[in-house]
Amino acid sequence: MIYHNHLQKLIEAPAMLADFPQFVEPMVCEDRYLAPPVVDEANADLTVRAWRYWYNVRGIVEMECRLEARATAIIMVHPWGIDDGHGLRTPEPAGCAFFCTPAKNHVVRPHVEQVINPFLRRLRARVGLVAFSMPLIEDNLRRRLYASIGTPPEALDLAEGERQLAALMDGWDFTGAPLVEQLDLDPAHPARSYMEQTPSTDACPRYDGDGFWDLPMPVHAAVDRQATDRVFYDGEGYARVRDYLRGQGIRHVLVTGYCTDMCVKSTTCGYENLSQDFNVFVVGDATLATFPASTTPRFATQVALHNAALWQLVTQVNWVR
């Protein structure tokens, strides 16, 4: 297929990623150009305007891609249900999980409610699949709560699953050890020795408690799910997800979720894997990046999307129609 790389300079184009400035810092960009779509299906009924950054062009290249909706999946990466009122909590006094502190974890709920849920509600009836990726492998508890590759919706027992989840979480001791009080530093390299012994994200049994990472992680309680949605499990591998999506006739994937700079990028359902086999569009404002040392994910998410756009097509919720 011959693609004609004709670029038309855009004049006075509005800022990108400007709909939810409380979550993503709007982009005021260098030169922007409009290119022909790289995905242009004859029976398209879904338009996805997307962009990438191209150094050789010295700017951003945008395009209006046209997709068949039923051949499109929305995959939300790692909507972990931690500190969401569903039972699983960040261990105290120094544990790390999800965005790594309880205060940062609480940023997820308003993002889900204001950005993710309206996006899912608007598109669920049109797209071929809505799915969520979660850690570990399918277990007996989550098999009752979530349809998956191996568990059909009619096999669910939601009431029993929720009962078991509540009982497990209510009985769990979310307590770890306090911060280390004394270090034995290398006198020749004290700074390096200090950093090696106090990693910035230490999600080990010392601080999170034994068995914490073996717990059946639920999907965040605020996410608007349907029984027909699927959950994919990281521990079952990308090949299983890929083959399932192909079997459902999926050719395109809209990637959302947490965290833009980490799990959305490089876990089982991250864009690095999916873009090997599908036309991938990262829905930028439907993601949040980690934001250490900051009180807001706005700037970190913008930077993570800049980096993603070097190799991926990036869109935003109001550009998917």
Image (cartoon, helix red, strand yellow):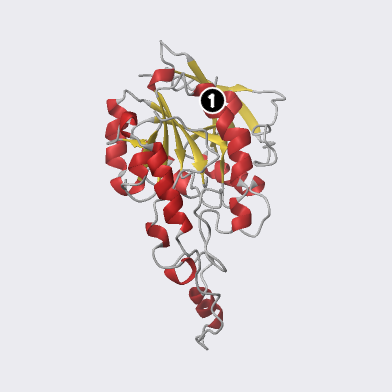
Q: Is residue 295 left or right of residue 303?
A: right
- Note whether residue 316 is visible: no
Give the labeled residue for mark 1.
Answer: 121
Q: Position of residue 272 (x, y in %)?
A: 40, 42
Q: Position of residue 293 (x, y in %)?
A: 65, 60
Q: Which quadrant of the figure has residue 44?
A: top left
Give amino acid for label 1: Arg
Q: Which residue extends farthest bottom?
A: 187
Q: Which residue extends farthest right?
A: 12
Callout count: 1
Q: Is residue 87 above or below residue 198?
A: above
Quadrant containing the C terminus in the rendered view? top right
Q: Position of residue 46 (x, y in %)?
A: 49, 17
Q: Is residue 315 above or below residue 311?
A: above
Q: Is residue 117 above or below residue 206?
A: above
Quadrant containing the N terminus in the rendered view? top left
Q: Is residue 172 left or right of residue 284?
A: left
In terms of depth relative to the viewer, which is nearer, 27 or 101?
Answer: 101
In terms of depth relative to the viewer, which is nearer, 57 or 293?
Answer: 293
Query: Could you tell me which residue is drawn at 51 percent across and 54 percent down?
Result: 98
Q: Which quadrant of the figure has residue 210?
A: bottom left
In terms of depth relative to the viewer, which is nearer, 301 or 309?
Answer: 301
Q: Position of residue 255 (x, y in %)?
A: 47, 35
Q: Of helix, strand and loop, which one carries label 1?
A: helix
Crowd band around label 1 with a 10 angstrom C-alpha radius: few (<14), some (14–19), many (20+): few
Q: Which quadrant of the figure has residue 74?
A: top left
- Note whether residue 290 is visible: yes
